Amino acid sequence: YTISRDTPEGGKLVSIIGPELTSLYNYYLAGGTSQTDDIFQIFGSDVLIEIHVLDGMYSSVVNLLTTSYGLYDVVQDQDFVAVTGKIPIENLISLNALTTYINFVRPVYPAIPTQGIVTSLGDVAMRSDFARNGFNLQGEGVKIGVISDSYNTIIGNPAQDDVIKGDLPGLGNNVNPNPVEVLLEYPYGTRSDEGRAMLQIIHDIAPKATLAFRTGFINAPDFAEAIIDLQDAGCDIIVDDITYITQPFLTDGIIAQAVNEVKANGVAYFSAAGNYGNKSYQGNFIEGITPTGISGFAHNFAGSGGNDIYQSVSLAEGNYTVVLQWDDGSGSDNTSTDLDIYLTSNNGNTLF
């Protein structure tokens, strides 16, 4: 994903819909073919967006956008902070005028699944087969909830085929006739059904456990809601394989808070949150010498012993998502500072 070159000088754009959606709008208007990638979720000529509303304007925003701006497939936030739904790409730019209703709009960045490449030997690798056979433990009396992308969206009803083969519990499975309880399926078409794959592995490890599924791929607030929903459904254990780049790295966001809440109520929670520590930089801000033409202060990567405002990166040709987060003590939803990344050539000339 690249920001279009028609953004303002220096690559910084301040508007309600932000640079990503502005770039998408301009590309679409110029006749470009919209495709789903790491930034957008595209459905024909529509895009999935997350609208953060101003205080007291939640109902007004929902009514206005659904009746006059083409917003549909709406998922409402229980905390009345964000509205999620699909909107025609051609209507995006009109949202910039709604300054008395909307705080900001961003694309619903696709959740990042963090499953491993090979998982079929998990039972043996964890030695759970020894525990199951040695202590005659089959998972009876335990309910396990899974949060992932989808359960049974692939055409042909593969979940029923898994039940017949004994890979999932349900009617016809002699070991466990209790079907998987699906609290909410992924609502926006076909996904990979990774949640069903996770449930297959859990069924191998604890064949008599009661299983439940709830999608977490709508957005981060809905993921947090999924955690509470599975607890309310009686799950003793909850597992997930999802990462959201919009969740704060340096403090507990809504998802981490939901995990803490269910843990405090006795639920065991296990997350496959990706460990991207070897693909990141973290440090305290140190003021460096700012180049001519850029306002504010540049960060000094060399620390107090020198001055180097550039961090060199070597990447193979491809698509990359770069995330910048910072903590200035203002809380996860507010900040008193504004930080930006500039991608430059080796001589410091700004590219984006």
Image: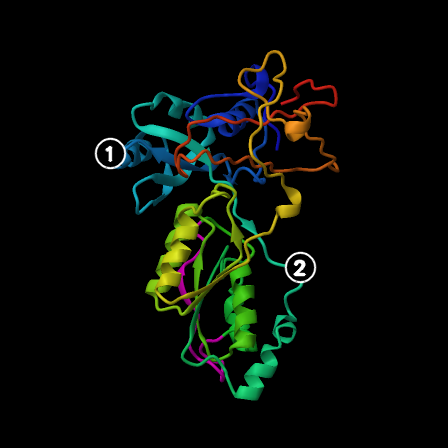
Residue under the image location 52 percent in, 36 percent down: 325
Instruction: Establish if 202 lies above or below 91.
Output: below
Towards the viewer: 36 or 245 = 245
Q: Are marks 2 and 1 in contact (CB under 8 Å)?
A: no
Q: Which residues are magenta?
A: 169-187
Towards the viewer: 236 or 337 = 337
Return the x and y of residue 348 as percentages of the image width and height. Answer: 70, 19
Residue under the image location 34 percent in, 29 percent down: 102
Residue ID for mark 2: 117
Return the x and y of residue 119 as percentages of the image width and height. Answer: 63, 66
Q: Main secondary structure of the magenta part?
A: loop
**Mark 1 nearby-residue class (10 Å; few <14, some 14–19, many ≥20):** few
Instruction: Establish if 327 lies above or below 25.
Output: below
Image quarter of residue 141: bottom left
Image quarter of residue 205: bottom right
Q: Secondary structure at mark 2?
A: loop
Image quarter of residue 77: top left
Residue ID for mark 1: 56
Residue type at the position of mark 1: Gly
